């Protein structure tokens, strides 16, 4: 079963699975326990969290962050809280969702804190496995980088850019608009992620539905090379297989460029960014440790660690490693916009770019 069918199944399961799961648990949820501490003075609340975390001794973190970034992130957290063992399980998309679903279905949830994309965050909330957590650190994030209910706060954001190979193209030869991508000279010369659903939805909103679908059909005639994963496309671009990649992660492009690779970027209009959220598991086995981990991850210290990976963070006042990615205001893709469109956009994307080939 391909990923889109699995994702549709995820969203379908979301409406029926939680009812049976909720009956399996009777005790207080992690969010309810932590909400009681909000009445305490900040110093007292922190002391209670630390005392509880010392008794719990560990935390389990499921994340879609790159594997080489997770270990240094956990080590930085441990410098602040050395008494906690950080258990990490790295996966993204459907794998992460299914693991959490399986744990909850069995009545033995292991995860405390989750980091996932907009797609997975939406599906997880619908299945009832998340709890709101109003970390005090959320006040340093704008409304577009968190939800009012407290379920989601941006751990990092990814500005989406057009990437090009600098040995194959001069900057003045690079397309300057999405319309430029329709020029005959680019036929067969461009990469696109085969699951670029958020990009698809954003452009349809930008152009208008009918004009947007017409544009997408014209773009599909350009014989695009579909490759799963923006990192994989970036590597192929560096290798000189093709000169252009339509939707890449800005920080990946600049990290490769900083290491001498022949790659650079431009921001087409609409220039947008997609968030990866950090979330509290509803039945977190280690709720006090989970709260410390989320608070630290969203703090200036934690967010500064994230920027060392080249990633863009949304917390106000944090110095970015690649400030050029935030010089131009990117349009955020809020969860309340993309979630209702996810199934429809995924289906239309595949009809146009995959099944229509």
Image (cartoon, grey):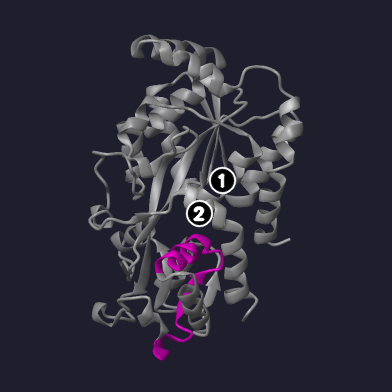
Q: Is residue 52 above or below residue 117?
A: above
Q: Which residues are magenta?
A: 183-206
The answer to whether 189 appears left or right of 170 in the picture is right
The CA span between labels 1 and 2 is: 9 Å
Q: How many marks?
A: 2
| Residue 228 occupies quadrant | bottom right
Label 2: how many Cα within 10 Å (few below 14, some 14–19, many 20+) = some
Q: Is residue 21 above or below residue 11?
A: above
> Going 61% across and 70% down the picture, which residue do you hit?
350
Q: Is residue 67 above or below residue 201?
A: above
Percent position (x, y) of residue 65? 48, 46
> Going 35% across and 73% down the picture, which residue do you hit?
164
Q: Which mark is drawn over residue 147? A: none
Tell me which label, 1 or 2, sits earlier in the chain: 1
> Going 47% across and 38% down the picture, which residue do you hit?
152
The answer to whether 24 appears left or right of 164 in the picture is right
Q: Is residue 192 magenta?
A: yes
Percent position (x, y) of residue 293? 45, 28
**Helix or strand or loop: what does disc 1 sit on?**
helix
Percent position (x, y) of residue 316? 27, 39
Q: Check contact, mark 1 vs mark 2: CB within 8 A.
A: yes
Q: Quadrant of the C terminus?
A: bottom right
Percent position (x, y) of residue 107? 74, 28
Between 34 and 16, the one lying in front of the other is 16
Q: Which mark is drawn over residue 338? A: 2
Between 235 and 131, the one lying in front of the other is 131
| Residue 178 occupies quadrant | bottom left
The answer to whether 145 appears left or right of 349 in the picture is left
**Helix or strand or loop: what does disc 2 sit on?**
helix
> Going 73% across and 39% down the picture, which residue do you hit?
17
Find disc 1 in the rendering and name its residue.
122
């Amino acid at each position: 079963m391909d990923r889109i069918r699995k994702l549709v199944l995820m969203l379908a399961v979301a409406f029926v699975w939680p009812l049976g799961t909720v009956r399996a648990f009777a005790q207080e949820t992690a969010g309810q326990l932590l909400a009681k501490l909000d009445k305490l003075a900040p110093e007292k609340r922190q002391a209670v969290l630390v005392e509880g975390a010392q008794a719990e001794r560990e935390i389990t973190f499921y994340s879609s962050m790159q594997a080489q970034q997770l270990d240094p992130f956990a080590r930085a957290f441990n410098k602040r809280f050395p008494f906690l063992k950080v258990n990490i399980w790295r996966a993204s998309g459907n794998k992460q969702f299914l693991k959490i679903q399986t744990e909850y279905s069995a009545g033995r949830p292991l995860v405390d804190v989750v980091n996932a994309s907009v797609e997975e965050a939406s599906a997880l909330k619908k299945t009832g496995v998340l709890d709101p957590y109003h970390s005090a650190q959320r006040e340093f994030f704008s409304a577009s980088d968190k939800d009012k209910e407290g379920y989601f706060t941006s751990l990092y954001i990814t500005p989406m850019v057009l990437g090009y190979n600098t040995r194959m193209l001069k900057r003045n030869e690079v397309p300057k608009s999405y319309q430029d991508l329709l020029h005959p000279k680019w036929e067969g010369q461009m990469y696109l992620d085969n699951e670029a659903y958020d990009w698809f939805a954003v452009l349809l909103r930008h152009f208008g539905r009918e004009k947007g679908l017409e544009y997408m059909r014209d773009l599909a005639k350009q014989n695009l090379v579909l490759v799963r994963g923006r990192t994989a496309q970036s590597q192929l671009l560096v290798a000189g297989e093709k000169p252009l990649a339509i939707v890449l992660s800005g920080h990946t492009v600049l990290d490769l460029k900083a290491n001498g690779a022949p790659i650079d970027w431009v921001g087409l209009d609409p220039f947008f960014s997609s968030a990866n959220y950090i979330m509290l598991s509803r039945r977190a086995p280690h709720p006090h440790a989970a709260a410390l981990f989320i608070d630290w991850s969203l703090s200036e210290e934690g967010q500064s660690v994230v920027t060392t990976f080249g990633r863009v963070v949304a917390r106000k006042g944090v110095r970015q490693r690649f400030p050029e990615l935030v010089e131009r205001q990117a349009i955020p893709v809020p969860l309340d916009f993309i979630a209702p469109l996810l199934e429809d956009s995924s289906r239309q994307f595949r009809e146009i770019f995959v099944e229509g080939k």
